[in-house]
């Protein structure tokens, strides 16, 4: 199972479910989002890799999910910072799911799409 922290109105909602990967998410606005998130992640030594994908959610709707491979537990401050970046680019009616993944889950995800951010060696 995956812990999913979805930013809504300044708070974090935690749900546990297994989103079903649909496809990588890449378009002009998504590229801007990825660029700004990469700038944020390069200052965070705990972020190893990040992926942006469209996934089918528990209620069978689809949404955009930011999958994050990180050292340690999910960082609430980082979640807030991601929300600020996302909120600066998209209207409040749009939502971004944030999923911190294990190495096993990442191996599965890498078969579907590549990371947009990789920590410098």
Image: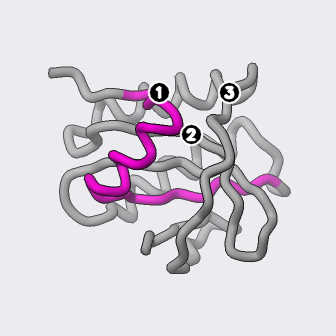
Q: Is mark 1 on a helix, strand or loop?
A: loop
Magenta-drawn segment: 94-117
Return the disc, 1 or 3, that comes first in the chain's sequence. 3
Return the disc, 2 or 1, that comes first in the chain's sequence. 2
Height in image: 28 above or below 104? Answer: above
Q: Mark 2 points at which residue?
A: 52
Q: What element carries label 2?
A: strand
Gap in Å between the C-alphas at discs 2 and 1? 7 Å
Gap in Å between the C-alphas at discs 2 and 3? 8 Å
Does the CB distance between marks 2 and 3 fall below 8 Å? yes
Q: In the rendered structure, does residue 84 fall within the stretch colored magenta?
A: no
Does the CB distance between marks 1 and 3 fall below 8 Å? no
Q: Name the residue under label 3.
A: 26
Height in image: 103 above or below 74? Answer: above
Q: Mark 1 points at which residue?
A: 116
Residue occupying the far left of the picture: 121
């Amino acid at each position: 199972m995956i812990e999913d922290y979805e930013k809504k109105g300044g708070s974090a909602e935690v749900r546990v479910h297994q989103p079903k990967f649909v496809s990588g998410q890449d378009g002009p606005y998504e590229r801007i989002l990825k660029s700004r998130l990469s700038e944020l992640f390069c200052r965070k030594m705990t972020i190893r890799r990040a992926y942006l994908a469209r996934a089918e959610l528990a209620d069978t709707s689809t949404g955009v999910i930011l999958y994050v491979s990180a050292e340690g537990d999910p960082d609430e401050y980082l979640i807030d910072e991601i929300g600020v970046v996302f909120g600066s680019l998209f209207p409040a009616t749009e939502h971004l799911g944030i999923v911190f993944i294990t190495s096993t889950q990442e191996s599965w995800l890498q078969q579907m799409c590549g990371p947009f951010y990789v920590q410098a060696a």
